[in-house]
Image (cartoon, rainbow, N blue to C red):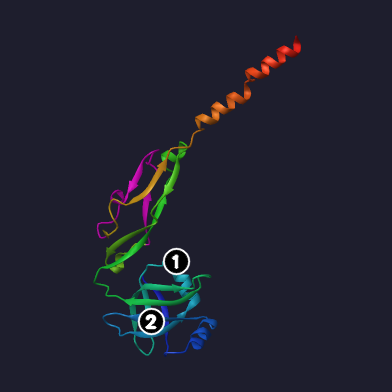
Amino acid sequence: MALSLKAEARKDATKSDIKQLRVNGKLPAVVYGKKVAVTVITVDQKELMALLRKSPHAVIELDMPDGGGKQPVMINEIQRHPLNRELLHVDFHQINMDEPVKTVVILEFVGEAEGAKEGGILQIQLHELEIRCLPNQIPASITVDISHVGIGENMLVSELTVPDTIEVKSDPNELVLTILAPQKEAPEDVATQGKEDKPSEAGEQAKEEQTV
C-alpha cells in the first residue's frame, strides 16, 4: 500500500519567500513525469520526514493541488544543507504502476554469524541493493540470513535470496559482508615480554661480583 502525502500549489518565488516557506514548515518541491507536467509544489516537511524514516524508497500517493488528483510518485532527489543536513528541496517523479522502476531497497541482516560466535569480526560492506521491479512489488527490505557465514568467508550479491519478481541490478560480484579472523597477539610482543621477565646476563654477572 502506497504512502500518502498532500501537495499544495506554489508559484515561483524569491529566495526570501522560499526561506519563509521553510520557516512555516513547508518544503519546496517539484513533481514531473509522463502524465504530469513539471509542477512546483510544497509539502509538509514533518510529514515528508516521517515518510523518509519509514520507507525512503517507497511509492508515495501524492495528492496534487488544483484538482490534479492523486498520482503515484517516487522521490528522485533530495537536496540537503551541506552542514546541518536540513531538507531544502525534493524532486518527485511520477510513475506508472504497470511499468517497472529502478530503485534501491534496504538489506536487513538477521541471525548471528557462526564466525562471529567463534570470535571473528563481522564487516558489512553493503547496506542497500539496487533492484528493478513493478512499483507495487517493491519490498520494504530484503532479509539476509548470515547465520551460516564462518571465519574467513564472505557473501556476494549473487548469493542473496530475492523474490522472483525482482531483478537485481547491483553487481553480482559486489561484496555484501565478510568475517575477518580474530586478531592474535603479535609474536614480537611475546618475545619482548619474555626478555623483560628474564634477567639479563650483565645483570646476573653484576650480582655475582657484589656477592664475592
Mark 2 surroundings within 10 Å by alpha-carbon count, few (fewer than 14), some (14 through 19), many (20 or more): some
* SS category of the residue bearing label 2: strand
Mark 1 surroundings within 10 Å by alpha-carbon count, few (fewer than 14), some (14 through 19), many (20 or more): few
Circles 2 and 1, Cβ within 8 Å, touching? The answer is no
Residue 39's spot in the image, x, y percent?
35, 85
Which dot marks residue 187? none
- Residue farthest along the right direction in this orientation: 211
Please state, as top left, top right, bottom left or bottom right, where the C terminus lies in the image.
top right
Q: Tell me which residue sits at (39%, 43%) in the image.
A: 147
Looking at the rendered structure, the kind of residue marked 2 is Val
Q: Tell me which residue sits at (43%, 47%) in the image.
A: 123
Looking at the rendered structure, the kind of residue marked 1 is Lys
With respect to residue 112, does 6 lie above or below?
A: below
Magenta span has 34? no
Residue 181's spot in the image, x, y percent?
43, 38
If you read the primary sequence from the N terminus, does the residue marked by circle 2 or circle 1 appear first? 2
Magenta span has 154? yes
Residue 105's spot in the image, x, y percent?
36, 61
Pointer 1: what residue?
Answer: 54
With respect to residue 57, does 34 lie above or below?
A: below
Q: Tell me which residue sits at (49%, 77%) in the image.
A: 45
Pointer 2: what residue?
Answer: 30
Q: Which residues are magenta?
A: 140-166
Frontmost residue, 184 versus 24: 184
Query: Is 199 situated left or right of 25 in this image?
Result: right
